[in-house]
Image (cartoon, rainbow, N blue to C red):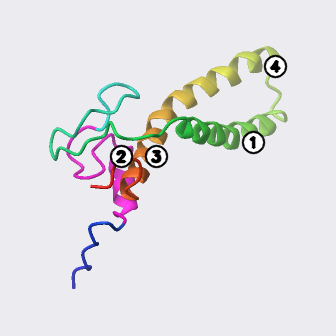
Amino acid sequence: MSPAPLPADGDRPFGPALLRALRNRCPDCGEGKMFGRFLKPVHACAHCGTAWDRHQADDFPSYIVILLLGHILVPVMVETTHVGIPIGVQIFLWPVLALVLAAALIQPAKAGVIAFQWSRRMHGFAA
């Protein structure tokens, strides 16, 4: 038995949309690319035509990345105090690791925020 279709004004499934967006694919169809450049969404999906320039992600992806970095790096930093890594190495290690992780996490975070807005028909995604 197939699931009942959602009403036109109901929420779209967030889970599949998030998984597609995390792969840099259109959350709607999963075929077209979501980002044309590093953090710039395409105007519209090349496959299904869904417009992605309506999003209002603003600073929320950055907050998500900061929260994740804190939860990843602080425990690692605390645990490495027992290893005996020289402070001179740590002065360079932690900022570089933070920058690399931030760069790796920002696009998926923004994709997830846009997919959430699309799935809940927020900020211009009502159609």
Query: What's the residue type where badge 4 is placed?
Result: Pro
- Confirm whether the magenta stretch covers residue 22: yes
Give the residue type that dot 1 points to.
Pro
Residue indicated by mark 4: 86
Name the one closer to the observer, 127 or 107.
127
User: How far, Cα to Cα, is label 4 from label 2?
Assistant: 40 Å
Q: Are marks 1 and 4 in contact (CB under 8 Å)?
A: no
Circle 1 residue: 75
Circle 2 Cα neighbour tier, 10 Å, few/some/many (<14 / 14–19 / ≥20): many
Residue reaching furthest bottom?
1
Quadrant position of residue 83: top right
Q: Secondary structure at mark 2?
A: helix
Task: Check residue 47 for magenta coloring.
Answer: no
Q: CA distance from mark 3 to mark 1?
A: 26 Å
- Residue 113 shows which numbered tag? 3
Residue hosting label 2: 21
Amino acid carrying label 3: it is Val
Amino acid type, callout 2: Ala
Query: The magenta stretch spans which residues?
Result: 11-33
Q: Going 56% across and 31% down the picture, which residue do you hit?
A: 101
Categorize mark 4 by other alpha carbons within 10 Å: few (<14), some (14-19), many (20+).
Answer: few
The secondary structure type at the circle numbered 1 is: helix
Quarter of the image with the N terminus in it: bottom left
**Image mark for residue 32:** none
Which circle, 2 or 3, is nearer the viewer? 3
Residue depicted at 29% across the width and 28% down the height = 36
Pinpoint residue 28: horizontal percent, then vertical percent. 26, 52
